[in-house]
Structures are given as C-alpha cells and as structure tokens.
Amino acid sequence: MNKDQRSLLAVMAIFAAVGLAYFNSLSNPFIFDDRHTIVENNYIKHRETLPNLFTNKITSFPITKGMWRPLLMLSFAFNYFISGLSPHSYHLINILLHFLNAVLLYLLLETFLKELSLCRRLGLTLIFCLHPINTEAVTYISSRSVTMCAFFILSGLYSYIRWRQDKKPYFLILSLASYILALMTKEIALILPMLIITYEFIYNKNFWKERKEIILGFLLFLLITLGYIFMIKLIFNEVFGLFAKAKSALATRSHSSNILTQGAVSFFYLYLFFYPFNLCVDHNFPIISSLKNPLGAIPLALIIILILTALSLRKRLPLIALSIFWYFICLLPQFYGRLNIVAAEHHPYLAYFAVYFIIGYVLLKCKPKKEVLRLLLIFILGLFFTLTLLRNFQWNNEYVLWKAELKANPGSEIAKGSLGLYLVNKGIDSEGEEYLKQAIDSEKNIASYPSILNLAAYYARFKDQPEKAMELLVQYQDRLLEQDSLRYLNTLGIAYAGMGKKQEARKAWEDALKLYPEMPEIKANLGWWHINNSSDTKEAKEYFLDALKGNPDSINAHLGLGMVFEKEDLPKKAIEEYKKSVKINAADPKAYYRLGTVYAQKLLDTKAEWYFKKTIELAPDFAPAYYDLCVFYLFLSEPDYPKAGEYFNKAKELGFKTDEKIERILEEKQEQIKTD
C-alpha cells in the first residue's frame, strides 16, 4: 500500500470518527446566542438583505460590538435557504468543519513530525476528533465562528508552509485567499500573520539572511491586514473599541484585569484538556484585578518564562518552541476581548493544536511500547467517545444543559436566567420564576440585564401581574436604558398593555420602532394592539405583513394575521397562517387553539375536536380550550352531554368565565337524566 492510499484510509477513519461522535447532535435545538444569530435574524432569511451582512450588520437585533463576519453569516443563510429553522443542516456544516480541521491537524503533524508513524499521527488526530472539550465548538451552532475561522487560518498557514517548501506561487495565492476568508469569518483571523512570522522565525535557519525575501512575502499579509483594519474603521468608526468616543457598555472590566484573568484562564484550559469532566458553558472562574492575587501574578510570570524558554529552544527543539508560541498566540484575542463569559470551552479550539504537536513530539522521542500505547489509545478513544456522546445529549435539551451547568457552576447567572426563561416558556411557572429571580439577584457585574426583562415580560404576559413587571422596569430603568433600550421599551409596552394603559403601550412600541425600525417583534405587538383596540383591521394587517416581510418565522405575526383573516371572514387563509405557526413551533398551544376555533365556528368541521385536545395536551391549564370542547360536544348533531359537562366543569375549575345559557342547558340535561 503506497503513501497516498494510506493517507486516504486515514482520512476515511477521521471522517468515520467525527461522524460517529456527532451523529446524535444533528437534531439538537438552537440554544443561547443561536436565537438572535439565526432564529430571529432577518438578514439571513431574505436574498435581498444579504448585502447588509457586508456592512455593519450581523443580526437584525442591534448588536453594537463592531463585528464584521459576512462569510459566517452567509453560511447561516445557506443553511436557512436549505432547511429553514430545522437544525439538521446547521449541525452538518459544523461537523464537516470539525472533520476538515482534523484533516489539517493530520497534515500539520505530518509536516512537523515527518518521522512519526502514520498510526501515531492518526491516533492523535482521532483524539482531537473525539475529545469532549471540542463539543461546544462543534455542537453549539453559533460556535461555527471558531471552527470555520480555524479552518481558514489552518489552511492559510499550511498553504504558506507548502509555498515556502515547494516555491509554487499558487500555494501563496491560496494562503492569502484563506486569510481574506478568515477575516470575513471572525476577527481572531488576525493571528494568522503572527503564526506565519513565528513559523519563519523558528523553522527558517536562514531567517536573518533571507529576511528581505520573508518581509516581501509577509508584506502581502500586512497589506491585507491594514486594508481590513481601515475597512473596519470606515464601517464602525472604531477598530474593536479603539478610537471610540465612548466606552462600550459591554466592557465589564478593565483591560489590565482582563489580561490578568485570561493569563490564569490559559492554564485552566490546559486543565480542561487533560481532565475534560464537568464541562459547562459558563465556568466559575474568578475575575482577577491585581498582581497581588497569586492567580494573577503566577500565571503571568509562567507565560513570560514559557516564552523565554521557547526562544531559547528555537534551534534545538523548534516544534516545542513553535507550540508554546502557537498556544498563546491563538489565545491572544481573549486577552483583548472583555467577554462576559470569562472561560468558554470553544475559545481554545485552535490553541489546543499546540498540545497535539507536543504530544506527537513526545511520542516520537520516547517511543513507548506499542502494546501499551495501543491499549492506552483504545481506552482514551473509548472514554472520549462516550463523554462526547453524553455532552451532545446535554446540548439536545435546554433543561438538561442548564441543569448540568448549575451542577458544575451553581453561581452561573447565565444558566439561571436561561433555565428560568426556558421553564416559563414551557409553562413551568413557579420554578422558572424562581430561577429568573436568582439570576437578577446575582446579576450585578455582567453587562446586560436580560433576566430582568424576561421576568418583567413574564409577569406582564403570562402571570397577569403587569404592576410587578412595571416595578422591575422602574427599579432598573437607568441600567436597562443604557444596556438594552430597545428591549426595555418593548417590555415596557407589554407591561402598559397588561395594565390597560393602551396609549402608553402604543407609544412605547412606536418609540422602540423609531429607535430601530427593523424589529418584527415590535411590529407584531403593534399589530395586536390594533386588533384589540380598533374595529379597523387594516393597520393591524399592515403591521403583521411588515413583520413577516422581515421575519417569516414570527409566530406572533402569523397568529395575528390569522386573527385578521378571521375578522375578515376568510377562514381558509386564517387556517393557513395558523398552520405556518404550528410548522415553526409545533409545541405552541395558541396556534392549535385558534385552528380549533376556526374549524368549529367558521367551517363547522369536526377537526376542531383534535385541535382543542392537542391544545390541552400541550397546555393542561388552557381553560378556553376546555370550554370550547364543551360547546363542541354540546352542539354536535347528536350531543355528547357527559363529555360536554366534564369539559365545562374543568373550564370553570380553571376560572374561565362561562356562559350561563350553556350552564343551564347542562343542568337541565342532568336533571332529565336523573328523572329518567
């Protein structure tokens, strides 16, 4: 078997390993940032809005972070045009990127460790494929920004190395093209020129003699970098927070504090690599603000020592030197970016390549016994495969994911807030409310206050306690206006509507639209305002159609448009809108209930029974569905009085205001049955 055939078999093994490890993630739902990045992102849902992704737009929700990621967002648009909001195609692309990165790791191991056997190179690559620390980068759809950018960075570096070795110009062109594509994916691509110059400095024995040639080649990367920075400045009037007139509200700690914290986090990531248990979205890592803190001083000193060591090892152990530089260069963006999540498992995805290089070097030099190494590899691969499957299973259900998060990090505000929102949306009110309250109590040092807004919206919309919602909004008004004025105004409108203050609600929503005219959610709310407060459905219809033009997946707008069609006596069109809502979210009881009412009242169709029962199945406390089932059974050609009475009593028990005529009919029938 020749080299090419062996390499092909290795690639097939890598493909099989990645596929087996992540096949159970294909149906995992959209979670966390996936909502505003994909689910509620109007720009990826229309061909005519795709050019916006090349300006200052990332999502249709205003995110003022200075991010320019058109290629990443186009990849999400590609998924949307293929499968809508079905997550399968999104996960397939993520898995494919992980496979391609694994192949590039295999090629880099072959480049740096030519004497390492194919089996050992493949074994290391399979560990990368199955390592549970990578599950967040692969399974969490929004983490595609990391895996996709890593692919272009690795392609750019590998192509550059091939250009320097083979002197073929098309490798240089491929490297430059990869760099441009990486920059269009995520800002961390700026590390590629640093990796290239580090490679030259360490591996080129004639570095100083060939410095002019190296500089001329490197100049092309530098020109692309300067062009990119100039463009970012032109679009955002700042470059990642530099030159900005005002301090970003997202900057929750100083640069010095962030550098100290990330210095310690760099070594924490190594701990997670070698002990990948109790993995979670938001690790409980302290913010370090002073060199007096040993967690700040010691890691920083170790980094300096390691860099100096790498410089001294440049000639004797070039791969070890490169690996040390590689690790910290790949983590360098985290030292600058002051993110809310201090230690995220997808951040070191590319940095971990350095660890595989070092392990490969150790395997080459130490030469352990084949039998021992084989057994150890089988054990590691089996363990990692199992852990990855289990971690993917956690990502399959938000309740499981956030519960696991709280087990690993009981103080996580993100987990409490996300779990609380999930539970209240599922109708598990008391538990969800408690988690949202806990998130607010502990949410003192993070940049935004989503849990306050979620709790206020819950009180106003589902709990029928708009006054409590208003108390929260007033208490945190200044902070909310600073952090998220758009959602604040939207939630304020919901609270006013619940209090019966119709004009105040309308003004809040109209003010929100003036602030950001592209928000379909607010347009849908204004549509509902016109349905509830005006006999003329024309304006309501325009708002709903405008909302759906922006976001065709807006359930609120589909339901509202269905109500408009009901009022216009167009039952078939109403059914069409409600079925669209069901298609988007098959667990939403409101759409099933409206379908039941249209079939019962407008079409006199027995399908109504199924839809009312489905509503009750999804929401056992949905009182109107019980009452309408009672009426349905009562007015059949052959009335079913026992069933009608059963559903009537349940509706009354749930506090539904029943019709006295219906109650009299049922009472008279009961008396008749007793008499007979």
Image (cartoon, rainbow, N blue to C red):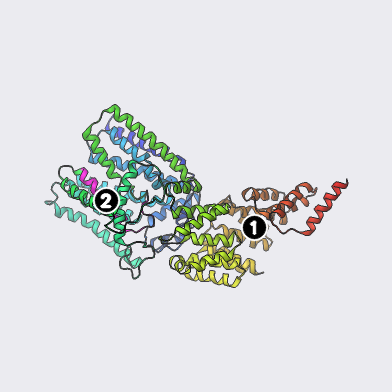
Residue 393, given in percent of the width and then of the height, sits at 47, 42
395 relative to 482, above or below: above
The picture quadrant where one finds residue 216 is bottom left
Side of 158 relative to 89 (left or right): left
Furthest residue to the top?
371
Side of 29 relative to 355 (left or right): right
Residue that mark 2 sits on: 328
Q: Of 330 and 481, which appears nearest the observer?
A: 481
Q: Main secondary structure of the magenta part?
A: helix
x 51%, y 56%: residue: 436
Q: Secondary structure at mark 1?
A: helix
Residue that mark 1 sits on: 574
User: How far is the residue under mark 2 from the one under mark 1?
Assistant: 58 Å
The picture quadrant where one finds residue 566 is bottom right
Whether residue 505 is visible to the viewer of this picture, yes or no, is yes
Residue 521, given in percent of the width and then of the height, sits at 53, 62
- Residue 154 lies in magenta, yes or no? no
Q: What kind of residue is marked 1?
A: Ala
451 relative to 529, above or below: above
